[in-house]
Image: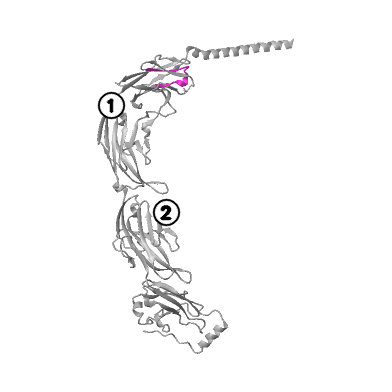
Amino acid sequence: MGAMREPLPRGALGSLLLLLLLGLCGAREVHLPPGPLFRVEGTAISIPCSVSEYEGPTLQHFEWFLYRPTAPEISIGMISTRDPSFPYAVFGPRVQNGEVSVQRLRGDAVELRIARLRAEDAGVYECYTPTTDSMYHGNYSSKVVLKVIPDMLGVLAPTPRPLLRGRMAGTSPLQLSLSEGQELQLSCMAQSQTQQHTHLSVSFGVSAPDAPVGRQTLQEVVGVRRDFAVEAGGHFAERYRAGELSVAKAGSEQYKLAIGRVRPGDAGTYHCTVGEWIQDPDGSWQLIAEKRAALAQVTVQSIASQLAVSASPPEVRLSAGDALELLCNLSGPAAPAPHVVYAVSWEVGEGDGLLVAQLDTDGVAVVGESYANSQVGRRQVSLQKLTPAPGSYRLRIESAQPGDAGTYRCVARAYVHFPDAQLREVASSRSQGLKVHMKSEAVVVEAYAWLPVPATYRGDTAELLCNISVESTQAVHMAVSWWVEVTLGEEEPQGRMVASLSREGVAELGRRASGGDMSLDKVGPQCHRLRLHGVEPSDEGRYHCAVTSWVRYPDRSWYNAGAVKSNSVAVYPYARAMDTLFIPLIVGIASALFTGIAILATITCCFMRRLRKR
């Protein structure tokens, strides 16, 4: 069915010419983008059209016509906003199935849309607006040239396949299986043989395994824009800035993607999307063609799922002083990544455990605080790597002590080195516990405190003795300390150390409440003495001695074999007899002096009165 334009009213042509000659402003004007427009066959196009400076209602109607190059004088009606029967027969079916449509943007603006261009769609497009003006004034149509060019864009996947020219290029992608931390490299070929001046954009993206591929499901990794700028998409942007991934052009047609350290979340189907862009006469850039090729189906095995730790032997029995040796075996990815490093440590005890030794990612061994301090000295503990990563590790304690008995576990942690010099922990695993039993000789220690002189007077020296008895077949060194129980208000008595003698025989004196002097000495093989010189009432309290037994092992380390606390003895400084008479004596003397002075004053007063009478 055809569509005929409305004939101009009588005299309208003359009036229109008159207005044009007079150059009056405010005439109706129809706007189309400048041409020519180049679009690719099989792609979609949208051509906007608007009208301004019109009279009448704000809702204007539009009619679209096509002039084909083979018949440039014949207009073919395509579609109208007011007449459903407007399209010619060649466009009727396409309008009915929605391939050709007109979309109203506002009352005086629409957009012609062709979902899939055909070669015969090339020509001159005219947008015509039926008049609503009181008189013809201005122009009622505008034209633009559309050239439909063949699809010359091609995408080539990395496998030996023919150049793919479909809208979605690609059949079965490569199957790649990587371990976490390894490098992923993919490439694609992009080319266009069009005669027009166009720019290409290349984007690498990933979609979830077996998910339908589309703009909604495809997550861009990184891409080269039409202006040669490189941008990463979504959460890949931070990794791109950190240098973890890159895209580069190799030659005139090849583009390469590299992800230096893949993560489990990087698994999926990778695609290469190539866009062809052309610049319209109005300066805007239009995407005229787009192709996508499936590059590879990538699976990433996490290190956590592959890292396993075992310890041997399952049980150890040894005597104190023997060497304790434990092995830790790590198994990880079959093809270890160069950026993956491991830290191995041994712990003893339940729960988090106490650190015995650790070998960090740089191969530096660190011994736990309980094995190197001022109390025990520095024990000979070593942790050595025996085989390449992940490998086997050996813990060796040269002289085992009774306190080394317990449950041991080997803990392994895997880290990935990133370009920003950061280490990120990606996995950890611990072995089953193995039991270490120690056969040791018991050390039995007892302590008894007593006062050789039960009664102590103020100003005297108070002596306190501590007798120690030891039952052991090995050499035992004693550390002795003296304590006094202090009561503050209604609180429970608290112990305060007065003095101590270390296992090496070094004395350390505290501070007495009275501030007086004190001394420590040894008066017998197992008898220690504390002397408080010039005791005062503030030294009163209950005193006891505490004894800690230490055993020294061949590696020159010390072992705390036990500690005991003696009974408590009371120190009470008594007052002397002279001290009890001193106060009454002073009171008596003072009273006598007062009485004598009073009598003398009375006599003197009477004598002076008699002298005045004379």
537, 546: nearer the viewer? 546
Q: Say if the magenta span includes residue 535.
A: yes
Q: Nearer the viewer, residue 372 or 80?
A: 372
Tag of residue 368: none
* Image coloring type: one colour
Question: For residue 540, which quarter of the picture?
Answer: top left
Residue at image mark 2: 238
Q: Nearer the viewer, residue 417 or 13?
A: 417
Looking at the rendered image, the quarter that the N terminus falls into is bottom left
Residue ranking furthest to the right? 614
The x, y position of residue 35, in whole percent, is 46, 75
In percent of width and height, residue 209 lies at 30, 58
Q: Are marks 2 and 1 in contact (CB under 8 Å)?
A: no
What stretch of residues is rendered in magenta? Answer: 527-543
Q: Quadrant of residue 44?
A: bottom left
Res. 325 visible in picture: yes
Residue 22 part of the magenta-drawn span = no
Residue 403, given in percent of the width and then of the height, sits at 31, 30
Identify the residue position indicated by label 1 in the image.
440
Task: Identify which residue is drawn at 33% across, 50% down.
Answer: 180
Examine the image and state in which quarter residue 489 appears.
Answer: top left
Note whether 88 is above or below 430 in the view shown: below
Q: Residue at x 34, y 32 (%)?
A: 381
- Residue drawn at x 27%, y 33% is 436
- Indicate the secondary structure of the residue bearing disc 2: helix
Q: Nearer the viewer, residue 113 or 365?
A: 365
